[in-house]
Image (cartoon, helix red, strand yellow):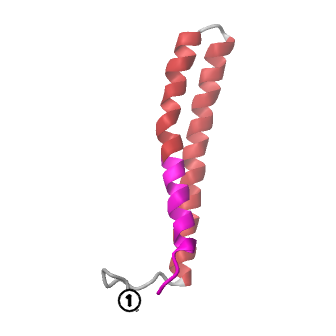
């Protein structure tokens, strides 16, 4: 049975390339988040608590992106062709 939209299932090589790309992008987003967290920590350590909170709020986008990429990578392996 084919997919509803007529697409063929991903072959093994395409899966590997997609997962490698997603993992690299996840790493990039997490490295960015770690840099933001370090900056917030430095501000808090210096007593600039309001600035630390302001900087910490910038964690949302890279963490959400990393989560979305993780979900996409995991779905590649979960979806079985019919």
Q: Residue at x 33, y 81 (%)?
A: 4
Which element carries disc 1, helix, strand or loop?
loop
Q: Is residue 76 magenta?
A: yes
Q: State whether residue 33 is above or below residue 81.
A: above
**Most distant residue in the left direction:** 5
Q: State whether residue 80 is above or below residue 75.
A: below
**Most distant residue in the right direction:** 45
In which quadrant of the rendered view does residue 32 lie? Answer: top right
* Residue 10 position in % (x across, y down): 47, 81
Q: Residue at x 59, y 59 (%)?
A: 23
The kind of secondary structure the magenta stretch mainly shows is helix
Graded by Cα atoms within 10 Å as few (under 14), some (14 to 19) or many (20 or more), the crowding at tag 1 reads few
**Which region is colored magenta?**
65-82
Quadrant for the N terminus in the image: bottom left
**Which residue position is annotated with label 1?**
2
* Residue 78 position in % (x across, y down): 56, 72
Q: Is residue 77 magenta?
A: yes
């Amino acid at each position: 049975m084919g997919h509803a939209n007529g697409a063929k299932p991903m072959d093994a090589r395409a899966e590997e390339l997609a997962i490698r790309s997603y993992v690299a992008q996840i790493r990039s987003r997490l490295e960015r988040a770690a840099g933001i967290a370090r900056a917030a920590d430095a501000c808090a350590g210096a007593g600039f608590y309001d600035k630390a909170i302001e900087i910490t709020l910038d964690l949302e986008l890279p963490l959400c992106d990393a989560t979305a990429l993780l979900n996409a990578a995991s779905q590649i392996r979960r979806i079985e062709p019919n």
